Image (tube, rainbow, N blue to C red):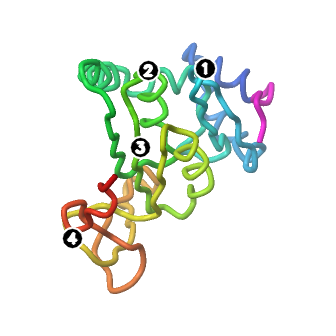
């Protein structure tokens, strides 16, 4: 784990943010150099996020992180201002980006319950969620059914973020939050 991204990564991401033609393809072509690199970014004085930059869906720098869902996070964080001891439930958390950004912007979160079924991101997912206030990561899927499921990809997009859950006889454990109140108890 590194605290500073490699120079080539930073250079290409700068080109990418400045919308230089070809920079996205250059980033895609070079991503294999960082296949094992995880960079830890400080989002605030108390929140950091570990990002596996060699993974297509998480090839993020600090600029990308702070630009992630800015309107949603602003509205969400503002809605929590009058509350205290909030439990944030993050279903399909991936590496915990949403939870980390919200926790870095809002001091009302007392507990984070995060669910992520993708086995490819379990290490950064666990590390990131456990570093949040009373963070509890669960390697489960949350859906409208209990049982098991598998992650499928549509033919037009094979990235992890396009995957969706379908019922299966075996595979990923699936819960509903209503039928599994153990996760919501104090």
Residue 50 relative to residue 171: left or right: right
The residue lying at 37 percent from left, 21 percent from top is 70
Residues tagged 2 and 4 counted as in contact (Cβ below 8 A): no
**Secondary structure under the numbered disc 3 in the rendered image:** strand
Q: Mark 3 or mark 4, which is nearer the start of the sequence? A: 3
Q: Horizontal and vertical percent for residue 155?
A: 37, 61
Q: Mark 2 or mark 3, which is nearer the start of the sequence? A: 2
Q: Residue furthest top?
A: 18
What distance separates the C-alpha of mark 1 from that of mark 3?
Answer: 18 Å
Residue 131's place in the image compared with 92, above or below, is above
What distance separates the C-alpha of mark 1 from that of mark 4?
Answer: 39 Å
**Secondary structure under the numbered disc 2 in the rendered image:** helix
Q: Mark 4 or mark 2, which is nearer the start of the sequence? A: 2
Question: Foreground mark, 1 or 4?
Answer: 1
What distance separates the C-alpha of mark 4 from that of mark 3?
Answer: 22 Å
Q: Which residue position holds label 3?
A: 112
In the image, is residue 5 part of the stretch drawn in magenta?
yes
Q: Which residue position holds label 4?
A: 145
Question: Callout 4: few (<14), some (14-19), or many (20+) C-alpha neighbours within 10 Å?
Answer: some
Give the magenta-colored segment's residue range. 1-8
Residue 175's place in the image compared with 113, above or below, is below
In the image, is residue 135 part of the stretch drawn in magenta?
no
Q: Which residue position holds label 2?
A: 105
């Amino acid at each position: 784990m590194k605290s500073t991204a490699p120079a080539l990564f930073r250079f290409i991401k700068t080109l990418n943010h400045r919308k230089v033609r070809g920079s996205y393809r250059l980033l895609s072509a070079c991503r294999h150099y960082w296949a094992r690199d995880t960079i830890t970014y400080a989002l605030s004085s108390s929140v950091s996020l570990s990002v596996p930059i060699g993974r297509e869906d998480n090839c993020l720098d600090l600029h990308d992180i702070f630009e992630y869902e800015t309107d949603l996070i602003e509205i969400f964080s503002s809605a929590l201002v009058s509350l205290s001891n909030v439990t944030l439930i993050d279903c399909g958390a991936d590496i915990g980006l949403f939870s980390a950004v919200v926790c870095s912007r809002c001091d009302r979160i007392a507990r984070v319950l995060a669910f992520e079924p993708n086995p490819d991101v379990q290490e950064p997912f666990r590390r990131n969620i456990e570093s949040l206030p009373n963070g509890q990561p669960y390697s489960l899927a949350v859906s409208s059914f209990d049982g098991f499921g598998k992650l499928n990809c549509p033919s037009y997009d094979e990235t992890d973020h396009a995957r969706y859950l379908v019922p299966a006889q075996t595979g990923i454990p699936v819960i509903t939050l209503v039928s599994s109140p153990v996760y919501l108890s104090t």
